[in-house]
Image: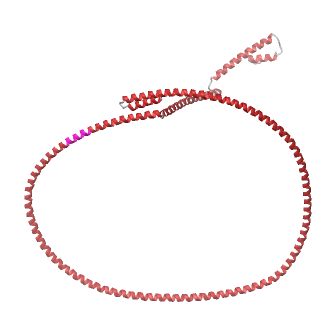
């Protein structure tokens, strides 16, 4: 038994619909309603499956969707961070601009004449207060200096009393020491006398010994002097011998120099003879070379004479050939001149014809140009009249524009006058507010300086003068 084929309901409905497409009535409508319900259910199931598949992250589409979502979230977070940074930077820049504007306003406010004058008076108050402080400090320092001098005087008195007591003690000590020293000096004097006597005896004994030693030394000196004299005599004799030897050496040197001079003269004579012989030999060689050169010149002259005869014959033949060639060239030149004259005549005739044609064409062109210029002048006259009409219309329009501009300028001046009046009123209000602010600032400074104990009379005078200037 064969197995059946199983198909789903949607395929079955599709097959039935394609088969019974032409059938009418309630059966077709029922089939269509069933097919539509099945398709709707299938579509719902498909949408559910798609929605469920969108939640999966382990598929390619899910991973791509997850990466895209993470990238989008990252970009959104970065954008939020950038927006926060931009907001912070905008806030910082706004604060900086405000601080700069406030500083500029303060500088401008401080650079005004009244603020400069008031600040100068404040500086005067500071200077007066500083001067009072310096005066007080100077008085305090003076008192401290007086106290220090009193203490120093008291210390000097104490030191003087101590010094007197020390001197008294030292004087007593010195007297005791002097007594002890006197006793010791007596003992030392006795010892010294005894010692001195002993030294005198020793010196006398030593003098006797020295005298004996001097006599012995004198005798030895005499003997040494005798020996030195003998040695001097011997040395003199040896010197005389040496002088004689030196004289002999000098004589030998003179003889040797004379022999050397004779040899030099002999060498000079021999060299001079050699030079004379060399000159004679060179003269002989020169004469031989000159004779050989003359012989060569004669032979060459003879050969040139023979060549000259041959050259004359050759030159005569060349002259004849040259004359024939010149005659041929002259005939060719005459022929060429004839042709050239003929060409010149033809060229002149063609130039005359061309000039005649050019002149006729120029006359025709002049006539056409005159005709064109006449017509063009008419056109220009017409254009000029139209242009004059346009200029008149433009001038009229321009005058109307001028009138409008005058009205606009009048309105503008009125508006500017009103604006100036408004600005003047606003400036007056600003000046009044500025004056009130300055009064408040001045009163605050006066109260602060008064609290600090400074002299505020210059500030009060300056404020009173400013009020008078404002009232004026």
Residue 59 in the image, given as x and y percentages of width and height: 64, 27
Here the colouring is: secondary structure
* Residue for point 18% across, 44% down: 159
Residue 293, by quadrant, is bottom right
Left or right of 330, for residue 185: left
Left or right of 228, for residue 472: right
Left or right of 152, for residue 119: right
Part of the protein shown in magenta: 144-155
* Residue for point 68% across, 18% down: 45
Residue 378, by quadrant, is top right
Residue 254 in the image, given as x and y percentages of width and height: 42, 88
From the viewer's side, name the closer residue of 202 and 47.
202
Residue farthest toward the top in the current orientation of the protein:
26
* Residue for point 74% across, 16% down: 9
Q: Quadrant of the N terminus?
A: top right
From the viewer's side, name the closer residue of 202 and 327.
327
Rendered view: 217 above or below 429:
below
* Residue for point 85% across, 79% down: 316
Rendered view: 371 above or below 28:
below
Residue 431 in the image, given as x and y percentages of width and height: 50, 28
In the image, is residue 148 part of the stretch drawn in magenta? yes
Rendered view: 211 above or below 195:
below
Residue 379, by quadrant, is top right
From the viewer's side, name the closer residue of 272 and 383.
383
**Tally of numbered discs:** 0
Residue 330 in the image, given as x and y percentages of width and height: 89, 71
| Residue 1 shows in this picture | no
Rendered view: 420 above or below 355:
above
């Amino acid at each position: 038994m064969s197995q059946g084929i199983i198909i789903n309901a949607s395929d079955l409905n599709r097959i039935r619909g394609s088969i019974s497409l032409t059938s009418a009535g309630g059966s077709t409508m029922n089939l269509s309603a069933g097919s539509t319900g099945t398709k709707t259910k299938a579509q719902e199931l498909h949408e559910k499956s798609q929605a469920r598949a969108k939640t999966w992250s382990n598929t390619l589409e899910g991973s791509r969707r997850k990466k895209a979502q993470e990238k989008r979230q990252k970009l959104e977070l970065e954008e939020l961070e950038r927006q926060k940074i931009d907001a912070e930077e905008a806030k910082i820049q706004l604060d900086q601009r405000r601080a700069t504007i406030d500083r500029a306003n303060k500088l401008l406010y401080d650079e005004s004449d009244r603020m400069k004058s008031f600040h100068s008076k404040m500086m005067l108050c500071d200077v007066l207060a500083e001067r009072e402080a310096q005066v007080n400090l100077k008085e305090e320092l003076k008192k401290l200096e007086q106290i220090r001098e009193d203490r120093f005087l008291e210390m000097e008195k104490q030191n003087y009393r101590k010094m007197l007591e020390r001197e008294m003690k030292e004087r007593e000590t010195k007297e005791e020491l002097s007594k002890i020293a006197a006793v010791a000096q007596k003992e030392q004097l006795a010892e010294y006398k005894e010692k001195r006597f002993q030294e005198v005896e020793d010196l006398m004994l030593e003098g006797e010994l020295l005298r004996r030693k001097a006599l012995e030394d004198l005798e030895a000196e005499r003997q040494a002097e005798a020996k030195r004299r003998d040695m001097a005599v011997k040395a003199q004799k040896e010197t005389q011998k040496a002088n004689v030897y030196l004289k002999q050496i000098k004589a030998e040197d003179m003889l040797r120099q004379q022999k050397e001079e004779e040899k030099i003269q002999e060498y000079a004579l021999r060299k001079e003879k050699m030079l004379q012989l060399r000159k004679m030999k060179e003269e002989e060689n020169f004469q031989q070379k000159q004779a050989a050169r003359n012989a060569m010149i004669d032979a060459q002259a003879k050969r040139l004479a023979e060549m000259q005869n041959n050259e004359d014959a050759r030159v005569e033949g060349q002259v004849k050939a040259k004359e024939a060639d010149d005659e041929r060239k002259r005939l060719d030149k005459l022929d060429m001149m004839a042709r050239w004259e003929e060409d010149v005549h033809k060229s002149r005739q063609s130039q005359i014809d061309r000039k005649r044609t050019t002149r006729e064409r120029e006359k025709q062109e002049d006539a056409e140009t005159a005709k064109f210029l006449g017509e063009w002048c008419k056109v220009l006259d017409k254009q000029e009249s139209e242009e004059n009409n346009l200029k008149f219309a433009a001038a009229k329009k321009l005058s109307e524009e001028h009138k409008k501009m005058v009205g606009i300028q009048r309105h503008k001046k009125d508006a500017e006058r009103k604006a100036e009046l408004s600005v003047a009123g606003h400036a007056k209000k600003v000046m009044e507010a500025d004056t009130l602010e300055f009064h408040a600032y001045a009163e605050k400074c006066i109260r602060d300086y008064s609290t600090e104990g400074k002299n505020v009379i210059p500030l009060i005078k300056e404020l009173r003068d400013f009020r008078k200037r404002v009232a004026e």
